[in-house]
């Protein structure tokens, strides 16, 4: 029996329309966001896992940025060390040339002086983000570079670092001359049996040894002195080569860690996607179906309301 105070048909049609509207809203959000799980109420377990994994991914992104800064600093230092090694090799070649009879050693020394100025420029210029591992004003120290992150079973995050001892890479030191590969004193004995003590660059202070001399020649320089300078420069080159190798190994290690972090981030994104991403083709079909269902139920509600209007006309 039809009644005016309560229209059961209209109420049922309205309830169906309300459910269709909510379903349409859910499908619209899924299609717009591309996610099946947008909030905890959609799937609490998947949402919790995805939130945790996104946090880990964000931490990895920060670690990758920090590793990028470390890589840039290492690359600059490595480039400077390579340039310094080449210049010192040229100085050695000039000293060997000066060993030949009849060579104007004063002219050769002018070239050596220019090369030494280049070394100073290289040492000062090898700086990135305020870090210069080739030049020290105080005592060199150990630098801890961010390499990667690791997460323990309890969810705690640990930062993995790579240690770089700048005492092994410092070229010039204005504090203690012995801290710099080019400012420290190299001593030994010449083939003729005479002792020598030489340093290549002046640090602006007093050499560690009062008897040490700066590498430099003139027409009055003896062959025995040249032999001592060549031996000292050989020792410098050995130290420079070792320092360059260490920097290269560090750069390679940082680069490998950055590649790993990048791949790990991609894996995390894929893992999160498998949990919360929506099947866009399926969602698009469901969205279209929800729209049609809403339209049909709107028509049904209109029909139910028209029936009530027809009954009201009997009382006019």
Image (spheres, helix red, strand yellow):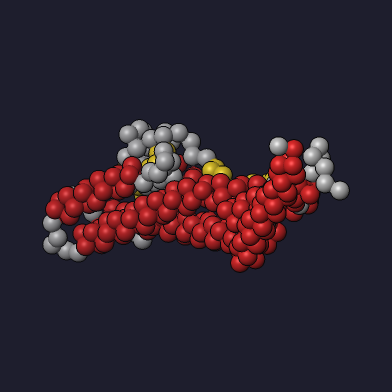
Kindly give the residue lying farthest to the bottom in the view shown.
281
Measuring from the top left, give residue 58's x and y in whole percent.
60, 47
Find residue 111 and report its horizontal and vertical position in percent: 18, 53
Asked whether the viewer can see residue 127, the reply is yes
Q: Nearer the viewer, residue 308 or 242?
A: 308
Q: Residue at x 52, y 46 (%)?
A: 66
Residue appearing at x 37%, y 55% in the figure = 79
Q: Is residue 277 visible?
A: no
Q: Is residue 212 above or below residue 234?
A: above
Q: Residue 204 occupies which quadrant of the picture?
A: top left
Q: In which quadrant of the rendered image does the C terminus lie?
A: top right
119 lies left or right of 36 = left
| Residue 6 x/y as whole percent | 81, 40
Would residue 263 appear left or right of 231 to someone viewing this image? right
Q: How many marks?
A: 0
Judge by depth and name the residue closer to the eye, 44 or 77. Answer: 44
Q: Is residue 60 left or right of residue 119?
A: right
Looking at the picture, how far across and down is residue 273, in whole percent? 64, 59
Q: Nearer the viewer, residue 23 or 263?
A: 23
Instruction: Check the image and name the residue furthest to the right.
Output: 1
Residue found 53% across the figure and 43% down from its top? 143
Q: Nearer the viewer, residue 291 or 74?
A: 291
């Amino acid at each position: 029996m039809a009644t005016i105070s309560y229209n059961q048909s209209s109420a049922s049609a309205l309830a169906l329309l309300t459910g269709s509207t909510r379903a349409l809203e859910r499908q619209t959000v899924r299609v717009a966001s591309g996610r099946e799980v947008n909030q905890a109420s959609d799937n609490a377990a998947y949402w919790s896992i995805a939130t945790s994994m996104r946090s880990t991914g964000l931490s990895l992104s920060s670690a990758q940025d920090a590793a990028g800064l470390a890589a840039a600093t290492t690359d600059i230092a490595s480039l400077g060390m390579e340039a310094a090694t080449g210049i010192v090799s040229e100085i050695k070649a000039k000293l060997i040339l000066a060993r030949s009879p009849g060579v104007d050693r004063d002219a050769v020394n002018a070239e050596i002086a220019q090369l030494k100025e280049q070394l100073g420029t290289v040492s000062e210029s090898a700086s990135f983000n305020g870090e210069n591992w080739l030049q020290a004003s105080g005592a060199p120290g150990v630098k801890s570079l961010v390499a990667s992150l690791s997460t323990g079973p309890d969810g705690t995050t640990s930062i993995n670092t790579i240690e770089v001892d700048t005492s092994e890479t410092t070229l010039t030191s204005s504090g203690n001359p012995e801290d710099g590969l080019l400012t420290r004193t190299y001593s030994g004995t010449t083939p003729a049996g005479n002792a020598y003590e030489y340093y290549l660059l002046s640090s602006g202070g007093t050499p560690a040894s009062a008897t040490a001399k700066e590498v430099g020649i003139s027409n009055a320089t003896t062959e025995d002195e040249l032999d001592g300078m060549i031996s000292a420069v050989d020792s410098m080159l050995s130290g420079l080569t070792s320092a360059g190798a260490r920097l290269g190994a560090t750069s390679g290690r940082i680069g490998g860690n950055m590649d790993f972090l990048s791949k790990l981030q991609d894996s995390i994104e894929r893992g999160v996607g498998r949990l919360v991403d929506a099947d866009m083709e399926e969602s698009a079909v469901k969205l279209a179906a929800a729209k049609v269902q809403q339209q049909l139920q709107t028509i049904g509600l209109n029909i139910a309301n028209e029936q009530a209007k027809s009954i009201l006309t009997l009382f006019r």
